[in-house]
Image (cartoon, grey):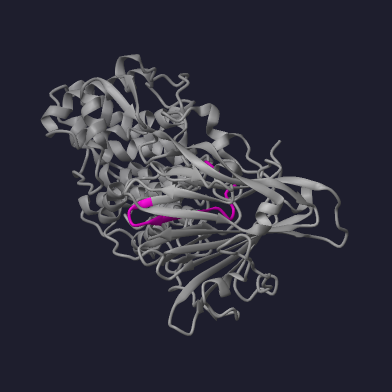
């Protein structure tokens, strides 16, 4: 039985608990400590509070206004009266056919499409011969293969690989085999609401690819498959595995209502359901409640395809769909680095800049990243050519999580085209080149660039991507600190209670990035919580996973390390004197997962040792040299 997690709390600026500053001592030279602000020549006063960015809220996210007749039509359909009986009760039901052709702006993966035409699925770097893939409901496929094969996402990749007439034979062969293995709605992964919703939507959007061949019998099977799936979703959509899967189901229902005969009642029913599901999927600033950038991308893609179906039917989509797209895009951009590629957060790998740019372009939304997506839980600082990202919120609740990670207070640092500090990422790709057996490890606190106590996760990592008890509250303060010469730094201070119950300690992290991006100073503090102090010591490790191609080397005295970047530049890591009194600096192996789901061997710096149950503080510095 899963532990019941309490509702996470995010304390914002102005919370008395968040406003308590702690003394800082982050020395440039470990043997000569000095306050962090003084060390970089900045005013050590509390500083000017950063004003929040433009507020994005769920306004005008409501179903379209309906007349009395349309309300009755929607009500009748909801209670089970068939669409043809509502629209034309005295007419014979129309044969299944498509009323329009959809043109989706979403790009496909040409390489995967070419591989499919050659007879192999290519999914997250793994090739599987089409003839050897079991398509039956009882087949046990890994999650990525289930999603791509049963959701028919391969249709988009196939259409991107060559002209339609060259792709049609492959598409017809595969859909014929799938329909033979799944002659009617059933159980298993093929008939999860998420996969069924994606499948129907992809069938409708890419209909020319599967309906253009000369085989009239197959064409009739496909059209009847569309109708059967739409009717099944009408009944099953409210039993979806999560809100994102429910959103996929509603999008498919609406698309079927737009593109299949006598579909108006289904469309009206679907629009009301979709708006409600979106309201429960997305937070006030536009971030999905799973906090997963992969889920954010999926939600955007669904709405882009749905908007294309509206255009094909010569109808304007509801204003709520357009408003939701404008909400969803800026938070996604918050987790992009300076080159446009994605950071490794909540199960995501480093999705390429091209994939992100293609998705954003298809959405038609022009927006800038949110620097302060507090409800979604991520902070972004741009300083010179450097970008810093930080997870400053509790993990998602179990009911929302798909690949939930115990990553609270972890950070990533990017500078001048190079990933310097990263998280491992890639749990959402497990089942491709990322082995399923290490999925839980990639979600662990130790797989992120943050502090770990006693090798225990700050929030419990459960099976099936779920999250248990642990961090329930995060306090956050963000400020800009100025100096007399016009220089500045952005200061983030955040703390979490994930280790309070077991160890009686609160983890507080302070990060300060200079405005030219040349220095990142940090301090990790463990503060006792409660009146009664605890005796003894507990192991700690502060992990800094470095980016691909970065070579690490320890100094002779073991107090610092050099980071040689692939472009020839050089950074230095220096541990504070207080940190070295409690522990030592070491280099260990690690891995990093790219946007194609390919794990790559990297290294990590680890500052580790024993800390008193009464608390401790560990300062460190990352500085660009030259």
188 on left or right of 543: left
* Residue toward you, 225 or 244: 244
> Can I make out residue 232 in this image?
no
Q: Which residue is most to the top?
A: 132
- From the viewer's perspective, is 221 left or right of 498? left
Determine the residue positioned at 38% across, 56% down.
Answer: 337
**Front-lying residue, 418 or 284:** 418
Inspect the magenta stretch and tell me whether residue 458 lies in it: no
Q: Nearer the viewer, residue 22 or 63?
A: 22
Query: Where residue 134 sits: x, y (%)?
Result: 39, 17
Task: Using residue 144 as the reference point, say whether residue 210 is left or right of it.
Answer: left
In the image, is 444 to the left or to the right of 234? Answer: right
For image coordinates 66% across by 42% down, the residue present is 460
User: Looking at the figure, which quarter contains the C terminus?
Assistant: bottom left
Q: Is residue 615 above or below residue 254?
A: below
Q: Position of residue 270 (x, y in %)?
A: 40, 50
Stretch of the chain drawn in magenta: 402-418
Seen in the picture, residue 358 relative to 38 is either above or below; the reply is: above
Quarter of the image that includes the N terminus: top right
Q: Residue 452, position in %: x, y?
A: 65, 47
Decide which of 208, 244 is in the foreground and name it: 244
Is residue 56 shown to the viewer in this render?
yes
Q: Residue furthest front?
A: 556
Where residue 322 sits in the image (x, y, percent)?
Answer: 33, 61
Q: Residue furthest bottom?
A: 484
Judged by its main secondary structure, the magenta piece is loop
| Res 173 quadrant in image | top left
Q: Is residue 416 magenta?
A: yes
Residue at 42%, 32% (x, y): give it: 144
């Amino acid at each position: 039985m899963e532990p019941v997690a309490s509702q996470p709390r995010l304390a914002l600026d102005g919370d008395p608990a968040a406003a308590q500053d702690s003394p800082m001592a982050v020395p440039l030279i470990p043997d000569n400590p000095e306050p962090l602000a003084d060390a970089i020549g900045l005013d050590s006063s509390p500083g000017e509070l950063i004003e929040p960015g433009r507020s994005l809220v769920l306004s005008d996210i409501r179903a379209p206004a309906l007349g009395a007749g349309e309300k009755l039509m929607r009500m009748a359909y909801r209670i089970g009266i068939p669409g043809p009986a509502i629209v034309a009760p005295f007419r014979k039901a129309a044969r299944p056919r498509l009323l329009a052709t959809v043109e989706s702006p979403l790009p496909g993966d040409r390489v995967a499409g070419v591989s499919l035409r050659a007879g192999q699925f290519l999914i997250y770097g793994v090739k599987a011969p089409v003839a050897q893939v079991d398509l039956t409901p009882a087949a046990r496929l890994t999650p990525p293969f289930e999603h791509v094969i049963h959701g028919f996402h391969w249709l988009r990749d196939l259409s991107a690989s060559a002209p339609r007439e060259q792709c049609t034979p492959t598409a017809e062969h595969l859909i014929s085999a799938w329909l033979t293995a799944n002659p009617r709605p059933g159980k298993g992964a093929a008939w999860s609401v998420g996969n069924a919703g994606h499948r129907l939507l992809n069938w409708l959007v890419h209909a020319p690819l599967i309906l253009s061949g000369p085989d009239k019998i197959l064409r009739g099977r496909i059209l009847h498959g569309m109708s059967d799936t739409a009717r099944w979703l009408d009944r099953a959509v409210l039993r979806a595995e999560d809100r994102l899967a429910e959103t996929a189901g509603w999008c498919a229902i609406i698309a079927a209502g737009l593109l299949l005969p006598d579909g108006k009642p289904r469309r009206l029913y679907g629009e009301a359901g979709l708006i409600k599901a979106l309201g429960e999927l997305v937070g006030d600033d536009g971030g999905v409640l799973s906090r997963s950038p992969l889920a954010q991308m999926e939600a955007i893609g669904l709405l882009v395809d749905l908007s294309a179906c509206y255009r094909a039917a010569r109808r304007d989509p509801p204003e709520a769909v357009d408003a939701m797209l404008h909400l969803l895009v800026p938070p996604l951009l918050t987790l992009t680095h300076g080159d446009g590629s994605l950071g490794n957060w909540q199960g995501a790998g480093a999705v390429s800049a091209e994939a992100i740019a293609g998705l954003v372009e298809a959405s038609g939304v022009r927006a800038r990243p949110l620097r302060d997506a507090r409800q979604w839980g991520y902070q972004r600082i741009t300083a010179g050519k450097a970008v810093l990202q930080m997870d400053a919120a509790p993990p998602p609740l179990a009911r929302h999580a798909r690949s939930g990670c115990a990553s609270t207070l972890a950070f990533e640092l990017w500078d001048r085209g190079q990933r310097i500090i990263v998280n491992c990422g890639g749990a959402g790709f497990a089942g491709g080149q990322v082995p399923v057996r290490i999925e839980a490890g990639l979600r662990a606190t130790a797989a992120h660039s943050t502090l770990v106590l006693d090798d225990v996760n700050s929030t419990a990592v459960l099976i099936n991507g779920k999250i248990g008890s642990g961090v329930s509250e995060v306090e956050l303060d963000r400020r800009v600190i100025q100096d007399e010469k016009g220089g500045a730094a952005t200061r983030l201070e955040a703390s979490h209670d994930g280790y309070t119950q077991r160890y009686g300690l609160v983890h507080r992290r302070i990060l300060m990035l200079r405005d030219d991006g040349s220095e990142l100073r940090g301090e990790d503090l463990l503060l006792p919580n409660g009146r009664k102090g605890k005796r003894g010591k507990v192991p700690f490790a502060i992990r800094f996973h470095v980016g691909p191609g970065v070579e690490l080397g320890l100094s002779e005295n073991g107090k610092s390390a050099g980071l040689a970047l692939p472009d020839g530049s050089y950074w230095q890591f220096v541990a504070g004197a207080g940190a070295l009194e409690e522990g030592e600096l070491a280099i260990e192996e690690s891995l990093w997962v790219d946007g194609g789901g390919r794990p790559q061997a990297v290294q990590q710096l680890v500052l580790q040792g024993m800390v008193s149950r009464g608390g401790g503080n560990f300062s460190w510095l990352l500085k660009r040299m030259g």
